[in-house]
Image: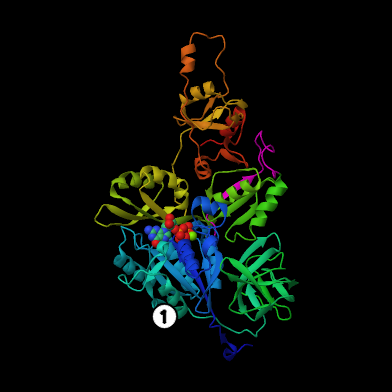
Amino acid sequence: MQTADMQKVRADIRNVAIIAHVDHGKTTLVDGLLKQSHVLRGHQQVGELIMDSNDQERERGITILAKNTAIIYQDIKINIIDTPGHADFGGEVERVLNMADGCLLLVDAAEGPMPQTRFVLQRALDLNLQPIVVINKIDRKDARVEQVVEEVQDLFLELATHDSQLNFPILYAIGRAGVAMWNLDDERKDLQPLLDAIINTIPAPTVDVDAPLQMLVSALDYDDYRGKYAIGRITRGRVTAQRQVARIRRDGSITYQKVPQVFLYRGLQRVEVTEALAGDIVALTGVADANIGETIADRDNPEALASFAISEPTVKITFGVNTSPFSGTEGKFSTSRQLRERLYRELETNVSLRVEDGKTPDEFIVSGRGELHLSVLIETLRREGYEFQVSRPEVVTHEDEDGHLLEPIEHLVIETSDEFIGSLTEALAIRKAQLVNMSTDGRGNMRIEYDIPTRGLIGFRNTFLTLTKGNGAMSSLLKGFERWQGQMKTHRMGALVASETGVAITYGLRNAQERGDTFVEPETAVYQGMIVGLNSRPDDLIVNVCKEKQKTNIRSSTAEIAVRLTPPVVLSLEQSLDFIQDDELLEVTPLHLRLRKRYLNPNERARMRARQPE
Ligand SMILES: Nc1nc2c(ncn2[C@@H]2O[C@H](COP(=O)(O)OP(=O)(O)OP(=O)(O)O)[C@@H](O)[C@H]2O)c(=O)[nH]1
Ligand SMILES: [Mg+2]
């Protein structure tokens, strides 16, 4: 038994997570903190958003994975955990918050608290983290600082479980300029006020460094030299290099392993140490098969830590072995075994993902926290050389005790100009959205809140961008599972479907364009049953895009010159996922995304349709 007097205060450490709604400036602020602490100097300066280090993060401009870094300020090591703000990556936030004693809650000075602000603050308060509020981006022309402060205070009043949680400092910042201030009219000099706030407000870890070791594995990393690193905060005791530890799996089984090396964080690097103590955030080598959520414990006294709570998935996609006529020609990995192995391996790190075997040995059902969560995975696999096919995203459903079907419902917040409200309201009504709240700033900007089935949100982002001409922001947060809301009639026009396998040519595509929009360029290899465009009518239409102009017909040689194609509509991965219907699939390879009918042969399609009357 441990007694309280064995607890020591690690005054040399602070552990802080940075949390916020998407795009409120977390990673930019971490850049600023790294720069201010001179971790980055001269040629080391590697541009902006250095923590957003993976390819998709850079391309999409968002953080996907939570990451650790550390700076030294006044001889105190501040471990910083940058987290993603997009709701689909909420699992990442849940995974890492247990390493922190406090959090910086960033709130955009113009947008104010948004759905994910509430979500991450709730999680932080549940874990009793000491908050510091940073009203960020006060340089924005549309900043409304006083109002946002009030909204944040209201949010705390609503979410706090005890009074001490209402006791938090508020700072103002322009993360991009690397400045933070206690008062709006203070000199805008650097981030020192924020660093002071961190070391003075966030409690130093109070720990027993002599008790038997306990550390929850909260993250994993790899490098070519040392293989896997198990990352987490030492809750109790100490880790010494070259000593044996126990690894306790989530099912309680234990294995014993030696930890060859122990690393602490320092800026963007890891620094090897011989020993680390409770309160430290460490990366350990040698635990090659460690998974997130497991406990690294004392060899002779192994006691597991409670793993963190992870919210459940809402959207699923069926991944299948590629069955197109082009299968096996573009990817390095295309077999069922390879796909299965890779998908199950993803579970080691992607904590809010679920994978199950499907109806056939060639199908796997992958569930995640949203379309983006799943599309990032699809893109990752594609880049690694996998090829496969995926089905239309569907919502995850449950049944209650009385056998009623339940579906995920989200709270949707839309901010846009009032001129778009009419068309948005119409589009949302079809998707069974219920208006919850509506407010205006008196200058033509509206904030509307709805409850809407996740089903209705799938594919809505595109519609939203079109309807608002890009002038708006939308975000949503899972409210919970509620009774199935009934049929939703959001239908699409029919597809233009290739009649045969071959190469699309200008003449054939020109003909197809008389029927609708085409998706492929001339010289594209197509196959029978592949979708090459969108019909302007509700039914599918078979077109021959490989068709050549008859050579004997010389009368219209002038017309031939006039054959000009409208450039094809090129759908992104997300747009393709939103496009496909139940009887369609998306073929994904390292080189191409192809839309196709599930049944390639038109006779088979007709047979299947006859079997399933609407
Ligand atoms: N006006 C203004 N813009 C800022 C400021 N800080 C960051 N930004 C911009 O806001 C955008 C988002 O910044 P990020 O730092 O990527 O935001 P984030 O919170 O890390 O985003 P996620 O990790 O995806 O949730 C970028 O375009 C930044 O340049 C600021 O102080 N003022
Ligand atoms: Mg970020």
Q: Which residues are magenta?
A: 311-334
Give 585 or 6, whichever is nearer the viewer: 6
Residue 314 in magenta? yes
Disc 1 residue type (three-letter):
Ser
In percent of width and height, residue 295 lies at 66, 72
Position in image of residue 194 (x %, y %)? 42, 73
Relative to 288, say whether 241 is above or below: below
Q: How is the image coloured?
A: rainbow
Q: Residue at x 71, y 68 (%)?
A: 287
Toward which corner of the image does residue 346 lie, by quadrant? bottom right
Above/below status of 89 relative to 212: above
Q: Secondary structure at mark 1?
A: helix
Quadrant where the N terminus is found in the figure:
bottom right
Left or right of 135 on screen, residue 393: right
Left or right: 215 as drawn, with respect to 417: right
Residue 221 versus residue 425 in the image, above or below: below
Work out which residue is located at the far left of the displayed protein and give it: 442
Q: Position of residue 477 (x, y in %)?
A: 45, 58
Main SS, magenta region, reads: loop
Q: Quadrant of residue 257?
A: bottom right
Give the image location of residue 394, x and y in percent: 53, 48
Point 27% across, 57% down: residue: 441
Q: Determine whether, in the image, residue 436 is placed left or right of residue 390.
A: left
Q: Residue furthest bottom?
A: 5
Packing grade of label 1 (10 A; few <14, some 14-19, many >=20) is: few
The answer to whether residue 287 is left or right of residue 603 is right
Residue under label 1, please give it: 164
Say if the magenta span includes residue 21.
no
Counting the numbered discs, the total is 1
Residue at 63%, 54% (x, y): give it: 355
